[in-house]
Amino acid sequence: MSQTMTGTGTGTGAEIGGGRGRAYWAVADCLNLVRRTLTHYRRKPVNILWQLGFPIVSVLLYGYVFGGAMKPPGGGGASDYRDFLMPGMFVMTMAFGFMNTALAVVTDASKGVTDRFRSMPMAPSAVVSGRWLTDLLVASAELAILALTALAMGWRPDGGLAGGAAGFALLLLLRSCLIWVGAWLGLLVPTPEAAGGLYAVAFPVTMVSSVFVAPSTMPGWLAAVAAWNPISSTAAAVRELFGNPVGSDGSWVQENAILMAVVWPLAITAVFLPLAVRRFRRLSR
Amino acid sequence: MGEWAVRAEGLEKRYGEKAALDGFDLAVRSGTVHGLLGPNGAGKTTAVRILATLRRLDGGRAEVAGVDVARDPARVRALVGLTGQYAAVDEVLTGRQNLEMFGRLFHLGGKRARRRAAELLERFSLTEAADQGVEGYSGGMRRRLDLAASMILAPRVLFLDEPTTGLDPRGRGEVWEAVRALVADGTTVLLTTQYLEEADRLASRVTVIDRGRAIADDTPEALKGRVGGDRIEVVAVDAADLPAVAKAVARVCEGEPRTEEGERRVHAPVSDRVAALTEVARTLQDEGIAAEDIGLRRPSLDDVFLRLTGEVATV
């Protein structure tokens, strides 16, 4: 081979990697993929605002436009409703996050980027773990921005530092389990355009919950569905931890919200992590 | 790596009932461009994806750069590059950021990845656009960046799956030039294409695939020879001259000249190309017959392709 090919000592194959073990490269490759998405945001900072646009507009709409007409559980005015609403908005942002995961996964798959990764001698696990870590980091940033917005609008958490930390941990736990749902869906749908249709499912699933109103205000059967919605468990748990009005309907699932806010995400992970990994492996069939 | 960069014997791959590959054989000599030609759905992409370890094979065996793809896929991945039908690059990142990211993922380390990226950008004439987002690149630029990304480790074998599909003639020319430069540096290229012109220009040997099997394997020249040799062709200005033209052609050709009345065209196979052309031109001039066009036609790979796949279809 000529000088241009080998000039930098870019040898082929085996000598690359410097003799480091598999575990090292599994972590290094994962971090490289995280870095990739963070570079996306650095190149297009406006993207993170687009992602936050929906929850922020919702906060304003429900907080100020409908807020006056909404009755917070336990009584009170519009400002009490905002205290009820804000943790719900955090939950909704986490819940809708699966769309971002699905979109990122299907974009890479349909553009051939996933195949390029698979044809390279990098750690195969990194494609999956990189997505997970990236989405959790982005979700943390989203939560921070949203919490500051909420504070500016007069939201007052009252659960102390430990409660606050536990609340945010539960929110990220919900986001984490939905990463696997999003990855699975992203490998299931054919194009990024088709992934947009997932909103039609995501919207009602998020609304039939305690995010905006207490389930007890809904018709009986719908109230039961809303109360058992995993999103409601996280919403109720986070409200409890933040010291905001909870609006429990007194049912078992709502009274044990913190427990269920851990159980539900673990159960969802137990189902969808294997499904997503299987779907990823099926790419080589 | 030895004489053969790729050896595949009896490759089989099925999707449900349908056999995508049905005993496919392939041998690619090191340091050459080998064309893999076939209609849509013939199994070209499946074959390439198996050889690049993206899909598992159901039967047969394949070695790439001397390594068995089923037994040691990780090692094969370190020795090959793949450029698929889409430019598999990150749209948001710049050209440079793309190559540096892929370099780090090839485990070059940050410093070497940066150096290699600069080198490849230069080599593929992308230095000027290096720090612009890929979104703004033309089709040809994207494909060149994609090629550059496949070249980061200086692979011994490069798989190019329809590298110019969807490109305009200029973009196609840019990619061809890049491929020629790679081969000059010693890389072996397996090129799938639907454009016979592309295989004709780049490949020193061509395998024709149809319904998951190799139905021909030869040099482009020899394949064309199978369809028949050169033909002389005369288009008359006036249809009334056609019998006279046919008579002139008959004096130099082998066999009967054929006359297409509607196109005012007479054509016939010839062996001594130049002598036949000169002789016919002189006769026409002597007899005062006006010709709109006179020339020699070599069979194209399209002719070969239609003949070969047509034959198989009718068996």
Image (cartoon, rainbow, N blue to C red):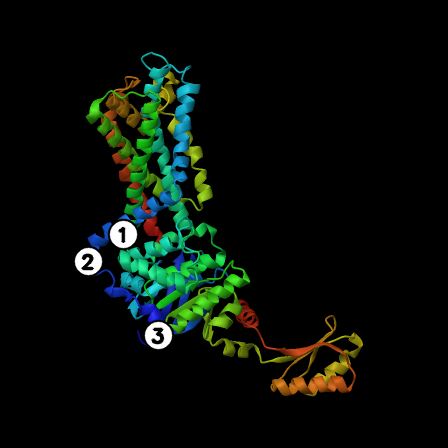
Is label 2 in a helix, a strand or a loop? loop
Instruction: Provide residue B154's location: percent of width, then percent of height.
Output: 33, 66
Q: CA distance from mark 1 to mark 2?
A: 13 Å
What is the chain identity of the residue bearing mark 2?
Answer: A
Q: Residue at x 44, y 33 (%)?
A: A200
Q: Residue at x 28, y 17 (%)?
A: A250
Q: The N terminus of chain B lies in which quarter of the figure?
A: bottom left
- Crowding near the residue tagged with mark 3, few <14, some 14–19, many ≥20 C-alpha atoms within 10 Å: some
- Crowding near the residue tagged with mark 1, few <14, some 14–19, many ≥20 C-alpha atoms within 10 Å: many
Q: Is residue A39 above or below residue B192?
A: above
Of residue B156 and residue A141, the one placed in the foreground of this image is A141
Instruction: Provide residue B178's location: percent of width, then percent of height.
Output: 44, 66
Q: Which residue is mark 3?
A: B4
Of residue B87 and residue A265, the one placed in the foreground of this image is B87
Of residue B7 and residue A155, the one placed in the foreground of this image is A155
Q: Is residue B107 above or below residue B199?
A: above
The image's mark for residue A20 is 2
The amino acid type, in three-letter code, at marker 2 is: Arg
Of residue A149 and residue B127, the one placed in the foreground of this image is B127
Q: Is residue A255 above or below residue B82?
A: above
Query: Marks 1 and 2: same chain?
Result: yes
The amino acid type, in three-letter code, at marker 1 is: Asp
Q: Residue at x 47, y 54 (%)?
A: B137
Q: Which residue is mark 1?
A: A29
Q: Quadrant of residue B45?
A: bottom left
Q: Can see residue A173?
A: yes
The amino acid type, in three-letter code, at marker 3 is: Trp
Q: Are marks 2 and 3 in contact (CB under 8 Å)?
A: no
Is label 1 in a helix, a strand or a loop? helix
Instruction: Provide residue B279's location: percent of width, then percent of height.
Output: 69, 87
